[in-house]
Amino acid sequence: MENYQKLEKIGEVDGMLAWPCSFFPSSLTRALYPGTYGVVYKARDLQNNGRIVALKKIRLEAEDEGVPSTAIREISLLKEMRDPNIVRLLNIVHADGHKLYLVMEFLDLDLKKYMEALPVSDGGRGKALPEGTGIELGRLGLGDMMVKKFMSQLCEGIRYCHSHRVLHRDLKPQNLLIDRDGNLKLADFGLARAFGVPLRTYTHEVVTLWYRAPEILLGGRQYSTGVDMWSVGCIFAEMCTRKPLFPGDSEIDQIFKTFRLLGTPSEYIWPGVTSYPDFKASFPKWARDTSQPLCSNLDDRGLDLLEAMLVYDPAGRISAKQACIHPYFRDFARTQNSHGTAGYA
């Protein structure tokens, strides 16, 4: 790892990244974020004009056994993925036989911190943005058009990944990074496939279940692109309301919070649901309150898109490709075409 220089403290780097993974190199004085798979560092790439990168050291359960060849193959494929809405994997370094380092494009702000920095009057917590982000929060904010911009970029990024048969499986606001121009990018796509869906973080903090699809919560072993689209729906609602849609504190609480809001699923609306390993016939039978919209501040098109993302049956859930051309984005696309950039409100 001699090509990556350890940095001195530059401002406040604690928690500047929200990558739920565990891969980092040797170039940093402090971990930016204790991720799901390991730790992320900020480093300087000495071979590329000293550019700042994010380094991730993959933590293996049995480091003496070396890096699994399947993981190497999966991660290597991610290097070929290039889309403006996806954080670039710049390099992979396999060192000492049992250590794997990922070199990533560096962005120091995630959607969670972005929302927390919003004024209290706008549903945020008024927290200061990480130093050096260059974000003009007062100009960007998180009004209707900004939500639409973020959602458009999120759906486009997921569409690209799904078209390359890559799933995320652990999408959440902490995985969505924002650059200084207010563009949203997806981080850590495909890592869950290579290393498994994490149950606990490197620091033994339980991974949030708030954005996890019901087919995973109910013990499904075979699932597809729908798991990501469910997560997108949860993130969509949270951007609109500034509150998580299903803030469960355990797997069963997560399941019940979902059932209370959407109604307990039956074979009629989700064929095969009772066959899932963790589905219980004794689950309470909640009925959905159809008189209340999932998000009161979304227009009809937005509600239609949200509902399509939160369909219980994965086979009936909207795809990323379909979402990208949903009428909800029609006026946003028109603004883009007319002015080259979205307006913010």
Image (tube, rainbow, N blue to C red):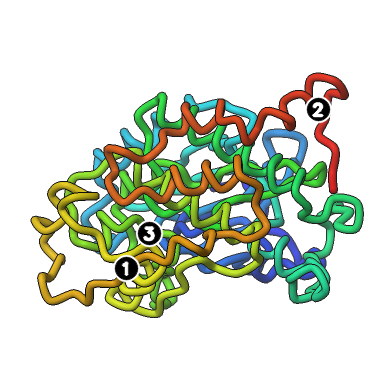
From mark 2 to mark 1, how far is it between C-alphas?
Answer: 40 Å
Q: Determine the CA span between mark 1 and mark 3.
A: 21 Å
Kind of residue indicated by mark 1: Ala
Horizontal arrangement in the rendering, residue 151 relative to residue 179 (left or right):
left
Which structural element holds mark 3? loop
> Relative to the observer, which residue lies in front, 279 or 83?
279
Residue 192 location (% of width, % of height):
35, 49
- Point 40% across, 32% down: residue: 76
Please tell me which residue is depicted at 25% across the width and 39% down the height of the picture.
69
Mark 1 — residue? 287
* Mark 1 or 3, closer to the camera: 1
Residue 212 is marked as: 3
Query: Few, some or many C-alpha atoms within 10 Å of disc 3 (few <14, some 14-19, many ≥20)?
Result: many
Helix, strand or loop under label 1: loop
Q: Earlier in the sequence, mark 2 or mark 3?
A: 3
In depth, the one of 274 and 101 nearer the eye is 274
Quadrant housing residue 190: top left
Does the rendering let one see residue 25?
no
Tell me the number on the disc at residue 335.
Answer: 2
The CA distance from mark 2 to mark 3 is: 33 Å
Q: Are marks 1 and 3 in contact (CB under 8 Å)?
A: no
Q: Earlier in the sequence, mark 2 or mark 1?
A: 1
SS at mark 2 in the image: helix
Q: Residue at horizontal 64%, vertical 30%?
A: 84
Q: What residue lies at 67% left-to-right and 44% top-to-bottom?
A: 150
Name the kind of residue labelled 2 in the image: Thr
Above or below, comparing residue 291 to residue 327 in the picture: below
Q: Nearer the viewer, mark 2 or mark 1?
A: 1
Q: Is residue 151 visible?
A: yes
